[in-house]
Amino acid sequence: MEKDPSADEHDESTMSKKQRKRLMKHQLFLERRKIKRQEKRQRKKEEKRKLQEEREDGGGTSAYVAGSFPKKFKSMNSEDASSLRIAIDLSFDDLMSDRDLQKLLKQVQRAYSVNRRAEHPVQLYLTSFGDKTKAKLQEIKCNYQQWNIHIKNGSYSELFPKEDVIYLTSDSPNVLSEIDESKAYIIGGLVDHNHHKGLCYQLAVERGITHAQLPITEFVKLNSRRVLTVNHVFEILLRFTESKDWKEAFYKVLPARKIISESKGGEVKKGGAANDGDLEEESGESEEVKEQVEVEVK
Ligand code: SAH
């Protein structure tokens, strides 16, 4: 503890110039310390708030408590919400390694987080929600029970009329031009490093379901395959519903390293979102992408 110079100097009038100076200095010190402590408390409060937000996004404690939302989050039941249905089909958990299932669930968490921050959240469904997925979510301490989302054990086919369903798959010859809010768009919940190439397309064909791919080639030039992650597909759909502009949606969502856009002079420049929080499903893809970028630039 520092010595308080005012303690042994009772009467200011009898103080020497030196003593008075010392007292003033000490008072100044106390004042500054008070401000510093206040600032520290404020910083800690801010850090705590940020941590809490991150936990909510990452699946920790959700802020959704019986319909009460912090201002910036919107519920799927709010009047601002869209009626568009987007389902993540979680029927492929047996085809994935433990690690890939975990990656997929991180992508699902990201999609959920993006939706709750959206101006017009869509009706987000998790279908074919099984025990394996449930166990994994519990293992990664994800509080999905409190999410404002439609979680269904049954398949999308039991939930939506067949004529409403459009299965999204990069292997479809059909290209999406618009989004019809009366339809239900299905995203395959699969992280497979291309091991199950064409699986979702094949299943859609077998079941006689409408299928379509995103209009990537029409709007952007990618330096990797057209197979995107679940969260990117979800967010592209969401952004398109906001802007009705595919190009803008791709640029907002896809990471810069995935996009090559050619300017008029034929010069190649990179585009895309600066920080995507990419949850890449392709092992070793970044190396492959780097190589392809170099080839394109030459
Ligand atoms: N081999 C898997 C790929 C999984 S990628 C398959 O058979 O689909 C995860 C999901 O994202 C896909 O099932 C699909 O629904 C969606 N997806 C990825 N890229 C897409 C694209 N270019 N167009 C439409 N949907 C896409």
Image: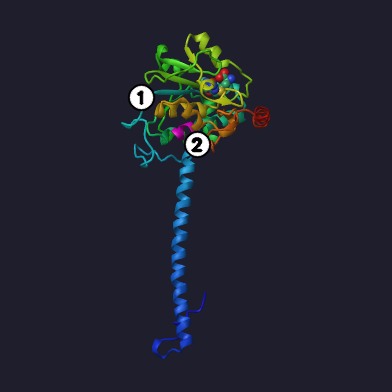
The answer to which of 284 and 222 lies nearer the viewer is 222
Helix, strand or loop under label 1: loop
Majority secondary structure of the magenta segment?
helix
Could you tell me residue 118's position as x and y percent?
41, 34
- Residue receiving disc 1: 83
Which residue does the image show at 44% across and 20% down from the upper left?
Answer: 185
The answer to whether 295 appears left or right of 127 in the picture is: right
- Residue receiving disc 2: 142
The answer to which of 249 and 75 lies nearer the viewer is 249
Could you tell me residue 114's position as x and y percent?
45, 34
Q: Residues within 10 Å of mark 1 (few under 14, many from 20)?
A: some
The answer to which of 244 and 26 lies nearer the viewer is 244
Could you tell me residue 191's position as x and y percent?
58, 25
Helix, strand or loop under label 2: loop
Look at the image and give the residue range highlighted in magenta: 110-114
The answer to whether 33 appears left or right of 199 in the picture is: left
> Visible in this render: residue 91?
no
